[in-house]
Amino acid sequence: MLRAFAALLGALAVRLLRATWRVRLLGPAPPYETGPVVFCFWHGRQAGLFAHPRPRPVAVLASLSRDGALQARILARLGFDVHRGSSSRGGAAGLKSLIGALRGGADAAFAVDGPRGPVGVAKPGAILAARAAGAAIVPITVRASRRWVFARAWDGYALPVPFAEVEIVRGEAIPAATATAPDVGAAIDALDR
């Protein structure tokens, strides 16, 4: 009961905060017409991505930890298709479930530097999912005019403050068949420049 209430409050807070942001989309539109899209970003940048349009359901992974349970509830309340698992626990089952969602017509979003980092080092999970589902990989990042940075968080979590200007920057799609984790990481880094 307490977790359900916390998830309700968390989702409400995200919606209220998002409503104050002035959002600009930069870069090419994702290639939705060619099939599913796998968005790839660094941990700590995901808060601003709540403002990205979602023309189709978006599947995400949440860890099997206690924190992951709360995160999963909040994400579900925000309309995401949540699958549980991470590279450290339940990863194969979570990834398999997420691939099923991609094959069923959803898009997906991955923090590609794993559940524990190191920050800014891409892991292969998103590429494996994209290949299995025939999806395009789209690097994406967020810039905010003002943000709170949670320095004690392992990923330096950045939350755009109320009324911030938020830029969601998308890169060119990367074919999954030839992508490597370093390619995807370099593409995300290039968007931050």
Image (cartoon, helix red, strand yellow):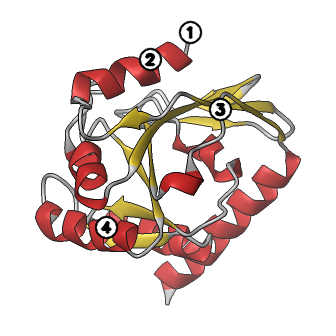
Image quadrant assignment for residue 25 = top right
Do residues under tags 2 and 1 come within 8 Å of each other at their CB atoms? yes
Q: Residue at x 56, y 74 (%)?
A: 6
Mark number, residue 160: none
Label 1: state its secondary structure: loop
Query: Badge 1 is on which residue?
Result: 193
Do residues under tags 2 and 3 come within 8 Å of each other at their CB atoms? no
Image quadrant assignment for residue 33 = bottom right
Q: Amino acid at mark 1?
A: Arg
Label 3: state its secondary structure: loop
Q: Which of the two discs, 2 and 4, labels the residue nearer the N terminus? A: 4
Q: Residue at x 50, y 53 (%)?
A: 34
Whether residue 94 is situated above or below residue 165 in the rendered picture: below
Query: Which of the two marks, 3 or 4, is nearer to us in this view?
Result: 3
Left of 22 or right of it: where is 104? left
Q: Position of residue 39 (x, y in %)?
A: 46, 45
Q: Tell me how far mark 2 sits from mark 3, CA to CA.
A: 16 Å
Do residues under tags 2 and 4 come within 8 Å of each other at their CB atoms? no
Q: Amino acid at mark 2?
A: Asp
Mark number, residue 28: 3
Q: Which of the two discs, 3 and 4, labels the residue nearer the N terminus? A: 3
Q: Tell me how far mark 1 sits from mark 3, CA to CA.
A: 16 Å
Q: Position of residue 149 (x, y in %)?
A: 57, 29
Q: Which of the two discs, 1 and 4, labels the residue nearer the N terminus? A: 4
Mark number, residue 98: 4
Left of 16 or right of it: where is 80? left
Q: Is residue 87 in view?
A: yes
Query: Which of the two marks, 2 or 3, is nearer to us in this view?
Result: 3
Q: Amino acid at mark 4?
A: Leu
Do residues under tags 3 and 4 come within 8 Å of each other at their CB atoms? no
Query: Badge 2 is on which residue?
Result: 189
